[in-house]
Image (cartoon, rainbow, N blue to C red):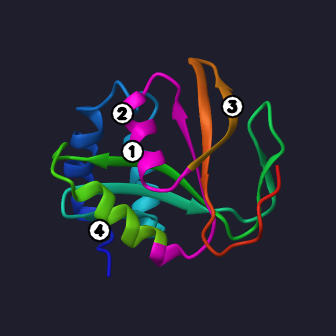
Amino acid sequence: MLKHAVPKQLDEIYKKIYQNKEWFPNTRKDYIGRMIEKGNVVYDNGILIVYKEYKRRSKIGTDCDCVAQKGDVKLHQILNTEPGSGKAGKILKKFLEMVSSNVWLTVDEENEHAIKFYEKNGFEKAGKINWSDGPGFIYYYENGGAKLYF
């Protein structure tokens, strides 16, 4: 069973995010605090996963027919506080088992390390997305939720 973050860990967690501001430039402390309160932050063995469940059917991206269904999960952030330890893949696998629904995420197209990690762990590229600070890719993991159609 994965450990979820508790409010007293907020400062520690945000410090780790801030140390990785290159990849998490818009992540605010108050947002992380709200996600912890909602039970949407895994903080286990040095691995941080921030996520949420889609409450309704939602289109994702700009160049595909990517549609998350109600009940699918969006992985907002994943951070290994000990890069190279091999822990991130193990915790991600447990996370995917825990949510047992399709999982979506977006990643900066320049973050080659993250892209390789997601692909190594079974995520497939589904399309592109454009943010104000640049382009990215949409990835999904088909995990027992509604069948995905693109």
Distance between mark 4 and mark 3 Cα atoms: 34 Å
Q: Which residue is mark 3?
A: 128
Q: Badge 3 local density, few (<14 within 10 Å), some, or many (20+)? A: many
Could you say where residue 95 lies in the image, as x and y percent from the top left?
42, 69
Which residue: 68% across, 30% down?
129
Q: Which residue is mark 2?
A: 113
Q: Earlier in the sequence, mark 3 or mark 1?
A: 1
Could you say where residue 119 lies in the image, as x and y percent from the top left?
48, 46
Q: What amino acid is labelled 4 in the image?
A: Val
Q: Which residue is mark 4?
A: 6
Q: Which residue is mark 1?
A: 117
Q: What amino acid is labelled 3 in the image?
A: Lys
Front position among marks 4 and 1: 1
Q: Badge 4 local density, few (<14 within 10 Å), some, or many (20+)? A: some
Which residue: 82% across, 56% down?
149
Q: Nearer the viewer, residue 126 or 80?
A: 126
Which quarter of the image is occupied by the N terminus? bottom left
Could you say where residue 64 lies in the image, as x and y percent from the top left?
80, 38
Say what secondary structure mark 3 lies in.
strand
Q: Badge 1 local density, few (<14 within 10 Å), some, or many (20+)? A: few
Q: Earlier in the sequence, mark 4 or mark 3?
A: 4
Q: Nearer the viewer, residue 131 or 37?
A: 131
Q: What amino acid is labelled 2 in the image?
A: His
